[in-house]
Image: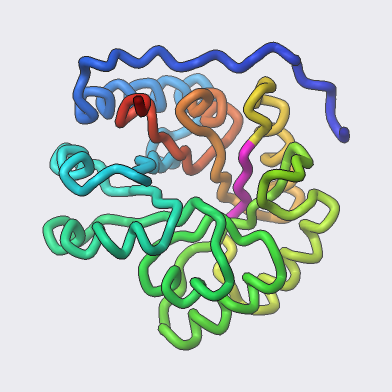
């Protein structure tokens, strides 16, 4: 591993009061993000909070829209297609982020629907997205997903393959906004976030899609520009 061995201590679980509404949790989240940004001498406006609305119905999402939240994350194109057209009619400035593994045969649907795609992880998907952008005349931001913990069960390109994949994406004229990662769930996330930030700097990329409900404040202190938060907003599923 090209960095110090991380602590084997489990990452702490967020303390979520289940009696609060998502809109109340949203206020708390924004305060914590602002604090983390301030502690890192960053402008909190440079951090985008993505509310991960996967599996949640429209009536659970709308209170967050009414409270001013505008960036939302979905895992599956089909699910997003089923619930977001009506919501976007009511809130037309909403931005959708695809954060789940994307099949190449869904690339055109993804380009048509999403404002950002966080899971570009292989040459075949680069090719499919480039073709879809040409067909749709639409160019959502793209994040290259890196398998930062070298976990076989996860998507993302290997660290060693990142330079070649970035070159392919740039040659295909994809609008590469930055890098994305999912650290190993059982380990301290900070070393992995720091490594992704270094990789982004080395390749001249400003965007960092990293940090979720358990570790978004740590991610912000280490440079994250997009945090993907689900359970800390919507509550833990039964």
Looking at the picture, tell me which residue is in the foreground, 58 or 50.
58
For this orientation, the residue located farthest to the bottom is 135
Q: Is residue 195 above or below residue 209?
A: above
Q: Quadrant of residue 15?
A: top left
Q: Is residue 199 magenta?
A: no
Whether residue 150 sits left or right of residue 94 in the image: it is right
Q: Is residue 179 magenta?
A: yes
Looking at the image, is 186 positioned above or below residue 137? Answer: above
Predominant SS along the magenta part? strand
Is the image coloured rainbow, by chain, by secondary structure, or in one colour?
A: rainbow
Residue 11 place in picture, x, y as percent:
60, 17
Q: In the rendered image, which quarter contains the N terminus?
A: top right
Tell me the residue at 24%/46% (across/down): 57
Q: Residue at x 46, y 73 (%)?
A: 139
| Nearer the observer, 50 or 20 | 20
Instruction: Give the residues drawn in magenta, as a range.
Output: 177-182
The residue at the point 70 percent across, 78 percent down is 171
Indicate left or right for 36 with 83 as reference: right
Which of the two residues, 139 or 202, is positioned nearer the viewer here? 139
- Residue 123, above or below 117: below
**Residue 149 occupies quadrant:** top right
Q: How many marks?
A: 0
- Name the side, left or right, on which 40 lies relative to 160: left
The one of 154 and 45 positioned closer to us in this rendering: 154
């Amino acid at each position: 591993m090209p960095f110090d061995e991380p602590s084997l201590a489990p990452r702490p679980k967020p303390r979520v009061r289940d009696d609060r509404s998502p809109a109340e949790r949203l206020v708390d989240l924004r305060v914590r993000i602002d604090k983390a940004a301030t502690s890192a001498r960053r402008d909190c406006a440079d951090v985008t909070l993505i509310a991960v609305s996967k599996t949640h119905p429209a009536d659970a999402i709308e209170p967050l829209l009414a409270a001013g939240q505008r960036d939302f994350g979905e895992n599956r194109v089909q699910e997003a297609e089923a619930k977001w057209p009506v919501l976007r009619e009511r809130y037309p400035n909403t931005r959708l982020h695809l954060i789940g593994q994307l099949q190449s045969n869904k690339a055109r649907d993804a380009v048509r629907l999403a404002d950002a795609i966080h899971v570009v992880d292989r040459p075949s998907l680069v090719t499919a997205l480039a073709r879809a952008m040409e067909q749709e005349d639409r160019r959502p931001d793209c994040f290259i997903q890196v398998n930062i913990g070298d976990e076989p069960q996860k998507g993302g390109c290997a660290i060693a393959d990142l330079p070649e994949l970035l070159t392919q994406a740039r040659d295909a004229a994809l609008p590469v906004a930055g890098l994305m990662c999912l650290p190993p769930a059982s380990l301290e996330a900070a070393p992995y976030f720091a490594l992704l930030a270094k990789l982004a700097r080395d390749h001249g990329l400003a965007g960092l899609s990293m940090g979720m409900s358990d570790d978004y404040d740590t991610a912000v202190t280490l440079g994250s520009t997009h945090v993907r938060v689900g359970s800390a907003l919507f509550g833990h599923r039964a």
